Amino acid sequence: MTVMNSFLDIHKTDPEALRGMIANARAMKDARGGRPKGEPDDEQPLKGRMVALIFEKPSTRTRISFDVGVRQMGGQTMVLSGADMQLGHGETIADTARVLSRYVDLIMIRTFEEQTLLEMADYADVPVINGLTNRTHPCQIMADVMTYEEHRGPIAGKKVVWSGDGNNVFASFAHAAGQFGFDLTFTGPETLDPEKAWLEFAASKGHPVTIDRNPERAVDGADLVVTDTWVSMHDPQSARERRHNQLRPYQVNDHLMGLAKPDALFMHCLPAHRDDEATSSVMDGPHSVIFDEAENRLHAQKAVMRWCLGV
Ligand code: CP
């Protein structure tokens, strides 16, 4: 039987499947044992498979980690920029999806509008992976859960504090709170609150998100402190100064990290604007696992792709 699972969002994926992907990612990482990146895995589950990696927005980590991951598993990739395709310009998303399905076995897309991702998944005959939209970034949070658990054991029941903008990366953290069972606190200005729907999802799973405008109070007892850039790719540059003014009290610096638990971790999905949302002293300090997060994109996404294809 051909398996065809699209990985569109954490809240749309069965918790057992999510757990299975994290376990598989850790097993694959352990099995590589620090071998050269270009050396193939012993197992080649994507042998003979072609994967399209489509980017309508810039990317370093997503682009490279998917490309390397496919190659390690024996598959081939084609990296496509939205600007070079007819996607949504000369051709409907639906027709593009149908055409791509005749050439490739799996599609990963980073796009602006969630609707583009959903339409691609609706009309493709092959699985589709969400490589970030304006609304969510599920692959990132799979890597983040993996990273937390590598360092500190099960994330269930832990206190995770997000300080800053209630953006698309936060959205996937809210979904993960519901699916993996951790306690999530949002601290940021009211004007940059996350979408209600994301909070409702976590609450519906028994893990309501706490909102606390006071960052010092919010991080008290935190096991994990997370932040992200103050101006996301889809935010207008004209909003930069206003956002900086609103978000400055939520900067993650040594003082704020010092209020979390002594063994708290610090995460940032990168790219970062050093000394804006987080100081270099925190990013390069003893709590930080930001480069483990970046590495784990590779391992987590390999597991996501295997789940999508059932291989
Ligand atoms: N974190 C992340 O998605 O990085 P890129 O934008 O570089 O892919």
Image (cartoon, grey):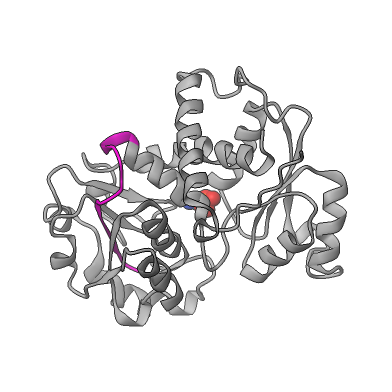
4 shown above or below 159: above
Question: In which quadrant will I find the N terminus?
Answer: top right
Q: Residue at x 39, y 54 (%)?
A: 272
Res. 220 image quadrant: bottom left
Q: Residue furthest front?
A: 1
Q: Give the camera-side residue of 71 and 308.
A: 308
Q: Give the camera-side residue of 14 and 182.
A: 14
Residue 34, percent from left and from top:
46, 20
Q: Residue at x 28, y 37 (%)?
A: 153
Q: Give the camera-side residue of 82 and 214.
A: 214
Q: Residue at x 37, y 77 (%)?
A: 192
- Left of 251 or right of it: where is 62? right
Q: Residue at x 47, y 50 (%)?
A: 15
Q: Give the camera-side residue of 226 and 85.
A: 226
- Left of 64 or right of it: where is 175? left
Q: Is residue 160 shown in magenta?
A: yes
Residue 198, percent from left and from top:
43, 70
- Left of 138 or right of it: where is 80? right
Residue 294, percent from left and from top:
44, 41
Stretch of the chain drawn in magenta: 150-165
- Left of 97 or right of it: where is 7? left
Q: Residue furthest bottom?
A: 191
Q: Is residue 113 shown in magenta?
A: no
Question: In which quadrant will I find the C terminus?
Answer: top right
Total numbered circles: 0
Residue 307, percent from left and from top:
61, 41
36 shown above or below 275: above
